[in-house]
Image (cartoon, rainbow, N blue to C red):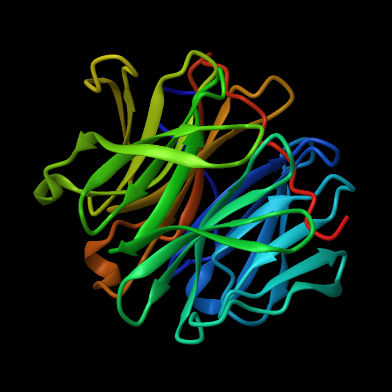
Amino acid sequence: MSATPELIANYQCLCGEGPIWHPDEGRLYWLDIDTGRIFRYEPATGHHEQIYEGEHIGGITIQADGSLALFGPRGMVDGWREGCITTLVEGIPGEEERRFNDCIADPEGRVYAGTLGQGLGNLYRIDPDGSVTHMVGDVGCSNGMGFIPDLTGLYYVDSVAGVVYRFDYDRATGNLTNQRVWLQVDTSQGIPDGMTVDAEGFVWVAFWDGNRVARYDPTTAEPVTTIGVSARKASCLTFGGPDAEDIYITTAIGDGDPALEGENAGGLFCINLGIHGVPEFRSRIGL
């Protein structure tokens, strides 16, 4: 694969997001939040398809049993398996005018999920028994998250603030403490959106209105690699494939002029740089 990301599929997503690799199936799943659609791609065959359309889904995790957990509006979480939907969390009081936006499972099957919408958003922890714990408030735009490989910390993006925060993470309790700014971004050059962490601990950030994703040194927070994307709004990225070396990048059209967003805006891209990612942990909500 070339050093330029290859267009895999283009469903002209208004807000392509949430890419996640399903190792059992050898497929990548991703979203279009604004149209309530979910897609999947099987690189072994080149086949891709839309599999869901409904209310806005802001994030996906792979459950321990191989099903999907869908994080939707009003703090709702549903389980999905080949079109069969079950309710896992009915909603979160106070989140009636917001929806989930990005989420990540931890090694114990908990999920951290942020909300956005009317007013400032929040970050929650949802435990396997369905209980919900408020973790962080007054979030401008809750976005990407990623664990440090040794599981001592969690990165978290607030796009409105243009900040990637770092927390200390306690695996035993699921608590997040010692929130501090790890990276402050000049948002005139693009807004930090989704993110992931590779096997070496380097932090990857997608830049909305920035035409790029970038890899940052975890010690200095300096960019060491930048990948241009032929869509202005790079929204998120993840590692996938059998060796976790394929970097999948989602993009968006947003509410901008499609003619100015790039000819492949809203598409899914892939590039392989020989850098290994880390498989995502699996959620256990309701299992």
Quadrant assignment for the C terminus: bottom right
Count numbered badges in the picture. Answer: 0
Is 172 positioned to the left or the right of 195 in the image?
Answer: right
Whether residue 280 is situated above or below residue 90 in the rendered picture:
above
Q: Position of residue 115 (x, y in %)?
A: 46, 67
| Residue at position x 24%, y 45% in the image | 163
Q: Name, please, the residue furthest toward the bottom.
A: 96
The answer to whether residue 273 is visible is yes
Residue 246: image quadrant is top right
Q: Identify the residue shown where x is 21% and y is 20%.
A: 222
Q: Nearer the viewer, residue 29 or 123?
A: 123
In the picture, measured across the screen, residue 284 lies left or right of residue 3, that is right
| Residue 212 showing in the rendered view | no
As displayed, is residue 54 above or below residue 235? below
* Residue at x 36% of width, y 66% of height: 253
Q: For residue 91, which quarter of the picture?
A: bottom right
Q: Position of residue 207 (x, y in %)?
A: 29, 46
Tell me where residue 154 appears, x and y as whole percent.
46, 35
- Residue 214 position (above or below residue 252): above
- Residue 77, percent across and down? 69, 69
